[in-house]
Image (cartoon, rainbow, N blue to C red):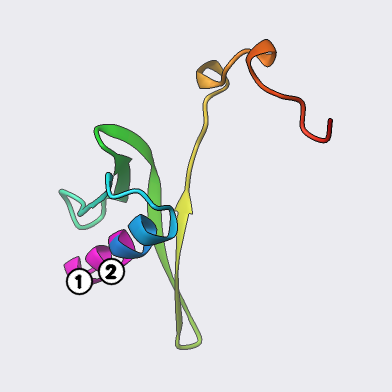
Amino acid sequence: MKITEIARVQEYLRKSLSNNRIVVKPPVKESAPVEVYIGDEFIGVLYKDEDEGEVSYSLTMTILEMDLPSIGDVPIIGS
């Protein structure tokens, strides 16, 4: 992914999610994934897809179960 694309996606994410701490880091090696952070916290990987002249970007975010709050600390959805 070109540096200009990374900058554009970073700006889109910052505006869409109202968070200027989002940083999209260019990969160290060309074959490495583009990583997305909020501050120093890694949140996911960004991919570019080109299909029939259409370009899209997808952010894959993995949430570890051990990072989730305990059930007693969250409201039940639909209640």
Residue drawn 33% across the image and 35% down it: 42
Residue 28 among those drawn in magenta: no
x, y (%) of residue 50?
44, 77
In the picture as drawn, the residue positioned furthest to the right comes out as: 79
Q: Are marks 1 and 2 in contact (CB under 8 Å)?
A: yes
Looking at the image, residue 30 sits to the left or right of residue 20; the answer is left
Question: What is the magenta range?
Answer: 1-10
Residue drawn 15% across the image and 48% down it: 28
Residue marked by disc 2 = 8
In terms of secondary structure, where does tag 2 sit? helix
Residue marked by disc 1 = 4
33, 23: nearer the viewer? 23
Q: Quadrant of residue 41?
A: top left
Type of residue at label 2? Arg
Q: Residues within 10 Å of mark 2 (few under 14, many from 20)?
A: few
Type of residue at label 1? Thr
The quadrant of the rendering that contains the N terminus is: bottom left
Give the answer, above or below, for where 41 lies relative to 29. above
Looking at the image, residue 78 sits to the left or right of residue 42; the answer is right
x, y (%) of residue 77?
77, 33
